[in-house]
Amino acid sequence: MINSHAHLDFDNMNTIAQNAVVVVPSIGKQNWQDVQMYPYFSFGIHPWFIEHHSQQDLNRLEYLIKCNNPIAVGECGLDYTKDIDKKTQLHFFTFQLSMAEKYDLPVVIHAVKSTEDVIFLLKKYPKVKGEIHGFSGSEEQAQLLTRMGFYLGFGMQITNQKSTRIRQIAKNCPLEFILIETDDHTNPDDLSLVAQTIADLKQTSVENVITQCDNNAIKLFNLE
Ligand SMILES: [Zn+2]
């Protein structure tokens, strides 16, 4: 079972996911080194940390992308719930989209209250494919993104019965466009709960969900 997005290098992770294939995204220069301990990692600058980064860091990011074989660019994106300058967020995000285009890599996107702008920017990079991890947009945006060939990542949030809106979106999203993840949840082994929830929502078997989501991750991230 492939965990498409888990920050295994974070201090609060109490489990190294056993027998699992995990994509470990970086959040900025603070963990570009650490994520390389894992077989599958990505290089990027998360919108929460852009203010600690300069143009020089963006240049270094490009150098790492070029030389160290990440499977994706990210985690990058836009987060409009944070008090972080929008212009700067847009600059860092578009730079990373252009890196994904230049080096022909998928992009791992963090989008919170910003999905409309993310879609607007993605249309400017039609060759770039990727995923919106921890999807939190609307049903219409979910449909639009999957039509554009983007994958949607769902995590522990959908296991909460009260998350009716996002559960409905996961239920309606074609399984061919779903990735499962645990993000910063402290126990990456709980991925099986996410898979089971999607199986329940879609009234299919958990084996079917895992097989399809694994294939999606293999295809998007070009895993071996
Ligand atoms: Zn993340």
Image (cartoon, rainbow, N blue to C red):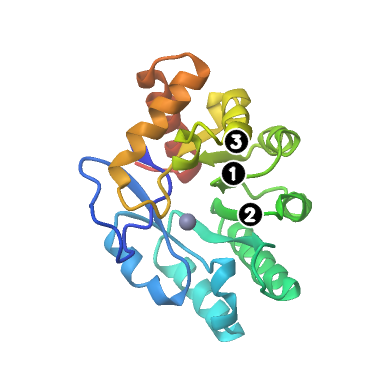
Q: Which amino acid lies under the numbered mark 2 shown in the image of this protein? A: Ala
Can the viewer see residue 137 in this picture? yes
Observer-nearest of 88 and 162: 162
Callout 3 crowding tier (Cα within 10 Å): few <14, some 14–19, many ≥20: many
Residues at discs 2 and 3 in contact (Cβ within 8 Å):
no
> What residue is drawn where x is 65% and y is 62%?
79
C-alpha separation, residue under disc 1 versus residue under disc 3:
8 Å
In this view, the mark in front (2 or 3): 3
Residue on which the image places disc 2 = 111
Q: Secondary structure at mark 3?
A: helix
Residues at discs 1 and 2 in contact (Cβ within 8 Å):
yes
Residue on which the image places disc 1 = 135
Q: Earlier in the sequence, mark 1 or mark 3?
A: 1
On the image, the x and y values in percent for residue 46 come to 54, 66
Residue on which the image places disc 3 = 166
- Marker count (numbered): 3
Quarter of the image that includes the C terminus: top left
Tell me: 14 left or right of 25. Answer: left
> What residue is drawn where x is 30% and y is 66%?
11
Callout 2 crowding tier (Cα within 10 Å): few <14, some 14–19, many ≥20: many
Q: Secondary structure at mark 2?
A: strand
> What residue is drawn where x is 61% and y is 65%?
96
In the rendered image, the residue lying farthest to the left is 18
On the image, the x and y values in percent for residue 61 come to 51, 74
On the image, the x and y values in percent for residue 84 come to 66, 74
Residues at discs 1 and 3 in contact (Cβ within 8 Å):
yes
